[in-house]
Structure formats: structure tokens, C-alpha cells
């Protein structure tokens, strides 16, 4: 009898453990981008798929994003352009010639005109809303506000509106070369995480920019050609996260490891994750809310 009671007690304890484990798993799956930025470090860098898996697919296509996600990314990049009728499109260049063969400036065209243009794989030029609708809260978005002309905040206002509509504030990092753009976003919604992109400038200029960047901009992202220990340490000393763009090959990745960066934009998601796992004990980040 005593033995039976003992076995029952052990089974009950085990059942309790399983229950606790299940609860922990549930809470892990609701991670926000803010929490990820707090746990990111050199052993667990953020891997951002640059324009999707753009080596093998049209830039900013579902095919490219889906491949990058299958290869293990949790972060997909969107470059933003705004049409003449104020719709946000995901495209790197202002003009569609390079990626589609059609000579059309997004900013001078209406959504009716842009909808007719196809990527080489038959997909359309995706409005940001279509990307949000498709992936919802299953991925993190790293969205760049891009400019050819003077900033007028139309793009920022539309972006903030869309993030609100899809309730994606915890799933978005906004990146820009324009400090003005990031400061405006922060004024409208201080909860949105921000990344300042730095051009390839000289050491003195970069030092001054880093020192003068508001503390709420948590990520400073270098052009890979300018990265050095002094600049990376300056970013870390000011409690920010140093990242770099764009990894194209294994040599670039070695540089990331050497300078102990905490995030990268990469054209090779699979190769980047593989090398980071081997050299830095890269841990896959928890999934966002499913
Ligand atoms: O956004 C980071 C990196 O993508 C910046 O360069 O020209 O590829 O948008 P670009
Ligand atoms: Ca970009």
C-alpha cells in the first residue's frame, strides 16, 4: 500500500512539473521586440533578413520573406516608399526600373498604376498593409523610412496609423538614416523601438552623431565598412545596441564576430545563422505571439 501511495505521489509531482513547463512555454511565446532588445547580446545577435531572402528571390516578395523565415529568421526588413495617393509600398528604390523593368517613380504614381507592375516572380509591389495582413504577429518587422526629397512626415503618419490598425507596436522596429524621421515617430508614439542607420562617414563625424543621438533610440546601425572597436564600444558605453548592414559573405560575418556586434542585416539568412551558431553559440530567439 505504501509503495502505491509513493508511486501516486511521484506521478502527481511529475504532473505538476509538466504543468509548470507548459505555462512557461506559453509565456515565452508572447515575447515583444522590446523584450528581445533587452536580452540581445553578442551571443544572441539579431539576424535581420535584408529585403527578405533577396539573394534567391525578388526583393520584398512573399517568396523571399517566406524563404528567410524557413531559414530561421525572426526579423524581416521592409524599405518604405509612398505613392502619390499616400499608400505605403515596400520597395527599396524610388523607381521600379531595376527590380521590375518598368520605369515608374513610386512617389509620382498612383496605387492604380503601381498595382499593374509585377515583380519577376509575378507578385505585385506589396503595400505595407498587405505584408502586415499576411504575417500579422508571426514575425518582427524592421521598417525603413526612405527619402529622396525633403521630409514631410506623410510616410511617418501613415506608418504609425498602420502599426496601430494592425496592433503591431510590439512587433516593429523603425529604422532610418533620418534622425528627424525617428524623432518624429518617437513624438507620436514613444513605445515604438527605433534604429538609427549611419552612413559611411569618418570617425569624427560618426563619434559626434553617436554622442548626440537621443537615448531612446536604442539601436545604432553602422555601415559595415566603418565598424571598429572604438565606435562599437562608444555605442555600448551609451547603453545602446550596435548593429551593422549588410552582410554579403563569410568575410563580412567574421567582421561581425570580431567586433562583437549584436545584430546584422544579411543577404544570406541561412549562412549567417549557421556561422553565428558555430562561432557565438547563437540561440534561436523565442517565437513572437502566434
Ligand atoms: O536598412 C539597412 C540597410 O538596408 C540600409 O541600406 O540601401 O539596403 O536600404 P539599403
Ligand atoms: Ca534598408
Image (tube, rainbow, N blue to C red):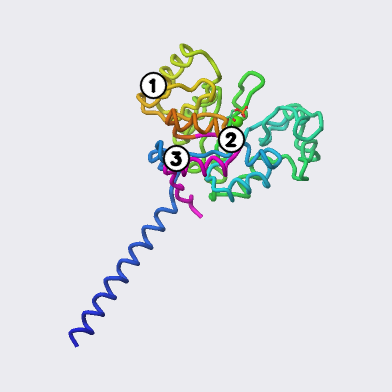
Q: Residues within 10 Å of mark 2 (few under 14, many from 20)?
A: many
- Apparent side of residue 124 relative to residue 149 in the rendered image (left or right): right
Q: Position of residue 44 (x, y in %)?
A: 42, 41
Query: Which residue is at a point 41% across and 58% down the rendered structure image?
Result: 26
Magenta highlight on residue 148: no
Task: Work out whether residue 163 or residue 72 is closer to the camera in this orientation and state it.
Answer: 72
Q: Which residue is mark 2?
A: 159
Q: Which label is found at residue 279?
A: 3
Marks 3 and 2, the one that precedes in the sequence: 2
The part of the chain drawn in magenta is: 264-290
Q: Residues within 10 Å of mark 3 (few under 14, many from 20)?
A: few
Ligand 2 within 8 Å, label 2 CB: no
Query: Which residue is at a point 39% across and 55% down the rendered structure image?
Result: 27
SS assignment at label 3: helix
SS assignment at label 1: helix
Q: Residue furthest top?
A: 204
In 3D space, how far apart are the residues under numbered discs 1 and 3 (Cα atoms)? 24 Å
Q: In the rendered image of this protein, does residue 171 appear above or below residue 92?
A: below
Q: Position of residue 82 (x, y in %)?
A: 68, 31
Q: In the rendered image of this protein, does residue 31 appear above or below residue 257?
A: below
Task: Work out whether residue 214 or residue 151 is closer to the camera in this orientation and state it.
Answer: 214
* Marks 1 & 3, CB-CB < 8 Å contact: no
Q: Position of residue 77 (x, y in %)?
A: 59, 37
Amino acid at each position: 500500500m505504501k509503495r502505491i501511495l509513493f508511486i501516486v505521489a511521484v506521478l502527481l509531482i511529475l504532473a505538476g512539473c509538466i504543468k509548470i513547463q507548459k505555462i512557461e512555454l506559453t509565456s515565452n511565446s508572447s515575447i515583444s521586440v522590446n523584450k528581445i532588445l533587452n536580452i540581445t547580446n553578442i551571443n544572441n545577435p539579431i539576424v535581420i533578413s535584408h529585403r527578405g531572402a533577396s539573394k534567391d528571390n525578388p526583393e520584398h516578395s512573399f517568396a523571399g520573406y517566406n524563404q528567410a523565415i524557413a531559414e530561421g529568421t525572426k526579423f524581416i526588413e521592409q524599405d518604405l516608399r509612398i505613392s502619390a495617393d499616400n499608400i505605403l509600398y515596400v520597395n527599396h528604390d524610388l523607381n521600379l526600373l531595376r527590380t521590375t523593368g518598368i520605369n515608374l517613380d513610386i512617389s509620382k504614381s498612383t496605387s492604380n498604376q503601381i498595382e499593374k507592375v509585377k515583380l519577376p516572380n509575378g507578385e505585385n509591389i506589396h503595400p505595407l498593409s498587405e505584408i502586415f495582413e499576411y504575417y500579422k504577429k508571426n514575425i518582427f518587422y524592421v521598417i525603413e523610412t526612405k527619402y529622396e526629397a525633403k521630409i514631410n512626415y506623410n510616410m511617418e503618419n501613415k506608418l504609425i496609423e498602420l502599426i496601430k490598425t494592425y496592433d503591431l507596436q510590439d512587433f516593429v522596429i523603425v529604422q532610418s538614416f533620418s534622425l528627424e524621421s525617428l524623432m518624429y515617430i518617437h513624438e507620436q508614439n514613444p513605445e515604438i523601438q527605433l534604429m538609427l542607420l549611419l552612413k559611411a562617414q569618418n570617425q569624427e563625424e560618426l563619434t559626434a552623431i553617436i554622442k548626440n543621438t537621443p537615448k531612446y533610440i536604442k539601436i545604432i546601425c553602422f555601415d559595415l565598412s566603418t565598424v571598429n572597436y572604438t565606435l562599437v564600444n562608444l555605442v555600448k558605453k551609451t547603453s545602446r545596441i550596435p548593429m551593422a548592414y549588410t552582410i554579403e559573405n563569410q568575410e563580412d560575418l567574421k567582421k561581425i564576430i570580431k567586433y562583437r556586434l549584436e545584430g546584422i542585416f544579411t543577404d544570406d539568412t541561412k549562412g549567417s545563422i549557421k556561422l553565428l551558431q558555430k562561432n557565438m553559440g547563437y540561440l534561436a530567439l523565442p517565437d513572437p505571439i502566434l
